[in-house]
Image (cartoon, grey):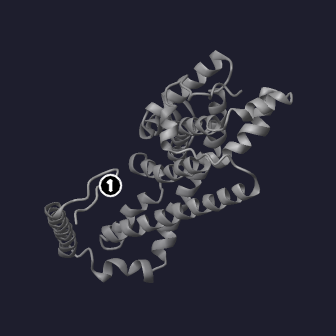
């Protein structure tokens, strides 16, 4: 009995199945060979020896001197960037929905300009500007530069997240607010923004995770003593345990971002249980569709 074709594709025949099995086996063999080569290379350089990993379990000084101070600086920089970028991004996102053309144009120009510049370049420019035009001490300058670069870039991205979240709401929300005599500012404050928060949360959390990871750029280029920058002194003082140091730092980053996403998921569930939601969720695709100033989805229109 022949296999019945499905709607989307034809079921593979015997020859296609054998070919797929053969390709799968070859792929698995290639992956296994690559893993073996990596492990063998690391073992040949003594990077997998227990002595390279023991300090992380037997010597608390490696944590108190390198890992925890680096983690503290990472958290400080990321927290400052989040606290500043979130309201700034919301402000520019709302401004891009203004009825006034000059407000939309100005906000759109700022957002698109800083979205187009890599965050590392923003950090380098900020560091040079603080060095040239301010009295910020050399010790604090890397932190200021990292936070400034993160704020400028991520505020522009978050502005698009906010705009997408508001435009994802049904247009009837605005019409109902107008029908009961609410002004534009009241409509935005009391109707649109509260309802769009749950829709924006996934994209907001994704960008907050990016902020945490991008702090490592300051350590690589500006000498900022963040978590990843602790690998070099750890490796130098504990027997060149580079792989072990990178692994521990990577695990700490994973745990930090996992805690952030877990808290956001709990908050999203609490918000959805506490009030009715439109059910809309803003993802990366929705934000990218709004990248060109002045473009709105059908039926969206200006909301402020």
Residue 248 figure quarter: bottom left
> Callout 1: helix, strand or loop?
loop
Residue at 34 percent across and 67 percent down: it is 235
Give coordinates of residue 31: x percent, y percent: 21, 66
Give the residue drawn at x 42%, y 37%: 118
The answer to whether residue 223 of the structure is visible from this angle is no
Is 175 above or below relative to 155? above
Q: Position of residue 259 (x, y in %)?
A: 57, 64
Q: Residue drawn at (52%, 71%), measured in percent from left and top?
A: 64
Q: Which residue is labeled 1 in the image?
A: 6
Q: Is residue 252 above or below residue 95?
A: below
Q: Nearer the viewer, residue 218 or 211?
A: 211
Judging depth in this view, the residue of 132 and 246 nearest the camera is 246
Q: Where's residue 288, x and y in %? A: 48, 36
Quarter in which the C terminus is drawn: top right
Residue at point 33% right, 50% down?
8
| Residue 112 visible in image | yes
Return the residue nearer the eye: 10 or 90: 10
Q: Is residue 208 left or right of residue 3?
A: right
78 up-or-down from 191: above or below: below
Give coordinates of residue 215: x percent, y percent. Answer: 48, 50
Depth check, front residue: 107 or 139: 107
Q: Which quadrant would residue 144 be assigned to in this image?
A: top right
Instruction: State the quadrant of the N terminus.
Output: bottom left
């Amino acid at each position: 009995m022949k296999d019945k074709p499905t709607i989307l594709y034809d079921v593979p025949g015997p020859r296609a199945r054998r070919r797929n099995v053969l390709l799968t086996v070859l792929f698995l063999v290639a992956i296994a060979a690559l893993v073996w080569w990596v492990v063998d290379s690391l073992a040949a350089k003594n990077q997998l020896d227990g002595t390279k990993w023991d300090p992380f379990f037997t010597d608390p000084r490696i944590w108190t001197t390198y890992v925890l101070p680096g983690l503290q600086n990472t958290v400080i920089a990321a927290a400052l960037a989040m606290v500043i970028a979130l309201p700034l991004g919301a402000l520019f996102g709302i401004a891009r929905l203004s009825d006034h053309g000059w407000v939309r144009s100005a906000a759109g120009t700022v957002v698109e300009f800083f979205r187009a510049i890599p965050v590392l370049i923003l950090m380098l420019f900020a560091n040079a500007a603080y060095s040239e035009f301010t009295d910020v001490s050399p010790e604090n300058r890397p932190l200021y530069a990292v936070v400034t670069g993160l704020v400028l870039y991520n505020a522009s991205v978050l502005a698009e997240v906010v705009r997408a979240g508001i435009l994802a709401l049904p247009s009837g929300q605005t019409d109902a607010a107008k029908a009961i005599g609410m002004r534009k500012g009241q409509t935005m404050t009391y109707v649109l923004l509260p309802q769009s928060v749950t829709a924006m949360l996934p994209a907001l959390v994704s960008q907050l995770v990016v902020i945490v990871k991008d702090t490592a750029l300051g350590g690589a280029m500006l000498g900022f003593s963040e978590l990843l920058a602790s690998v070099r002194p750890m490796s130098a003082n504990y027997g060149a345990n580079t792989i072990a140091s990178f692994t521990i730092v990577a695990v700490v980053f994973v745990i930090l971002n996992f805690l952030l996403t877990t808290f956001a998921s709990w908050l999203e569930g609490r918000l959805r249980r506490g009030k009715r939601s439109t059910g809309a969720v803003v993802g990366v695709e929705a934000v990218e569709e709004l990248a060109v100033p002045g473009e709105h989805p059908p039926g969206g229109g200006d909301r402020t």
